[in-house]
């Protein structure tokens, strides 16, 4: 397969070009040398959000959450496990709406947790409320 994909490193935010057919072979970042797919959600901030959403060819599922939110905390382990199951086809990320209020306002987040799927820099789907693992996987796959 000659297709290459741009994938943003979850550690240093460098954009890496990777052969599409080799994503499952545990690629390393060309800049920092760490694993591109860590099996964990990436923490996004105002500083790195646009790079991860706009520069990655992978769809990105973002969990907008807050530390004081009970349903958000209850869903966190499910979301973390889903990262390991859905990578490398999808990147999962989290935005703490308490510390990243400008991102919450930018995307008009009114209830949490809110899940949003971004592809090619644009939001393509949104789901509010906590979901179980099976529902999360079904929802993501339905929108890809």
Image (cartoon, helix red, strand yellow):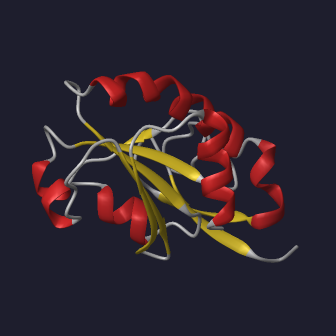
Q: Quadrant of the N terminus?
A: bottom right
- What's the residue at 79%, 47% (across, down)? 24
**Quadrant location of residue 38?**
top right
- What's the residue at 39%, 43% (across, down)? 129
Mark count:
0
Q: Quadrant of the C terminus?
A: bottom right
- What's the residue at 68%, 45% (across, down)? 86
Residue 140 vs 74, above or below: the answer is below
Q: Which residue is situated farthest in the right direction here? A: 1
Residue 120 vs 69, above or below: the answer is below
Q: Is residue 121 left or right of residue 3?
A: left
Residue 37 vs 47, above or below: the answer is above
Q: Is residue 138 left or right of residue 47?
A: right
At which x and y percent is residue 10?
46, 44
At which x and y percent is residue 123?
41, 71
**Viewer-proximal residue, 90 or 55?**
90
At which x and y percent is residue 4?
71, 72
**Quadrant location of residue 122?**
bottom left
**Quadrant location of residue 23?**
bottom right
At which x and y percent is residue 46?
20, 54
Q: Is residue 20 left or right of residue 99?
A: right
**Viewer-proximal residue, 35 or 30?**
35
- What's the residue at 59%, 38% (across, down)? 83
């Amino acid at each position: 397969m000659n297709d290459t994909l741009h994938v943003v490193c979850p550690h240093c935010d460098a954009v890496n070009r990777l052969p599409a057919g080799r994503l499952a072979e545990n690629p390393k970042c060309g800049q920092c040398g760490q694993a591109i797919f860590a099996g964990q959600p990436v923490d996004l901030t105002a500083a790195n959000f646009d790079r991860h959403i706009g520069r990655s060819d992978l769809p990105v599922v973002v969990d907008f959450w807050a530390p004081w939110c009970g349903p958000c905390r209850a869903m966190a382990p499910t979301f973390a496990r889903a990262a390991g199951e859905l990578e490398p086809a999808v990147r999962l990320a989290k935005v703490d709406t308490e510390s990243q209020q400008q991102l919450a306002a930018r995307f008009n987040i009114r209830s949490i947790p809110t899940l949003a799927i971004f592809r090619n820099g644009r939001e393509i789907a949104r789901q509010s409320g906590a979901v179980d693992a099976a529902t999360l996987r079904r929802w993501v796959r339905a929108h890809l």
